[in-house]
Amino acid sequence: MSSKYGDDRDPYLYPALNVMRNRLGIRQAQRLEQTAWEITSLRAATLPLGPRGRGLPYLCFIHHQLYQDIFDWAGQFREVDIYQGDTPFCHFAWIEKEGNALMRALEEEGYLSGISRATFVTRLSWYYGEINVLHPFRVGSGLVQRIFFEQLALHAGFVLDWRDIDPDSWSQANQLGAMGDPEPLERIFRKVVSEA
């Protein structure tokens, strides 16, 4: 997910390499990706079930817990614009404002507690798409978002089970959600969400 303006202008990357600067000194992308997966998997297993009331600081907490061994900026909002293909994520200067607005709306909806499964799926799909567009971190936003919503679902009386989700369908659904069409995400969440 390099900046559209080129890797040389991305302060998160080693100069002339498409590899994130990291605390481990790894300069090979595949090796860093594998090591990050191993470390974040271990860290994710130790995360406590967070508070029912959650907001942007809790997203940062999750990111920091997962990536603190890898990146100096773990838990901090990104400071560059990033894209997936031709789809831009939220401009970095707007992350805090837009993220807080989303979290206020989520709070006003009672963190999706006390609603039917069908309504939960619809609202979860919308919030998932919006927070995906926010993409607050340079790396790791997707993992943080999944954990955030898994915990939100548990507090609301639901469980998210991602096991049977096709990665290509998931990616396409997220891209369509970013363009304002939450229906593909809803179709997937109808399979993923069950009552606890």
Image: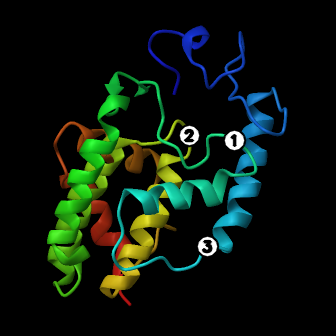
In the rendered image of this protein, does residue 60 appear above or below residue 29? below
Q: Which residue is mark 2?
A: 139
Rounded to the nearest angstrom, the CA distance separating label 3 from label 1 is 18 Å
In the rendered image of this protein, does residue 123 appear above or below residue 18? below
Q: Earlier in the sequence, mark 1 or mark 2?
A: 1
Q: Which residue is mark 3?
A: 47
Name the quarter where the C terminus is drawn.
bottom left
In the rendered image of this protein, does residue 28 appear above or below residue 151? above
Q: Which disc is residue 89 wearing?
A: none
Quadrant of the image occupied by residue 188: bottom left
Question: At label 3, which amino acid type do we have?
Answer: Leu
- Residue 86 can be seen, yes or no: yes
- Image point 41% across, 26% down: which residue? 83
- Residue 184 can be seen, yes or no: no
Disc 3 packing (10 Å; few <14; some 14–19; many ≥20): few
Q: Which residue is mark 1?
A: 71
- Image point 35% across, 21% down: which residue? 86
Q: How is the image coloured?
A: rainbow
Q: Could you tell me residue 69's position as x and y percent?
A: 75, 51
Quadrant of the image occupied by residue 151: bottom left
**CB atoms of marks 1 and 2 within 8 Å:** yes
Horizontal side of 141 relative to 40 (left or right) equals left
Q: Could you tell me residue 81's position as x and y percent?
A: 41, 24
For label 3, the SS is loop
Q: Could you tell me residue 182's position as x and y percent?
A: 19, 51
Question: At label 1, which amino acid type do we have?
Answer: Phe
- Image point 46% across, 9% down: which residue? 5
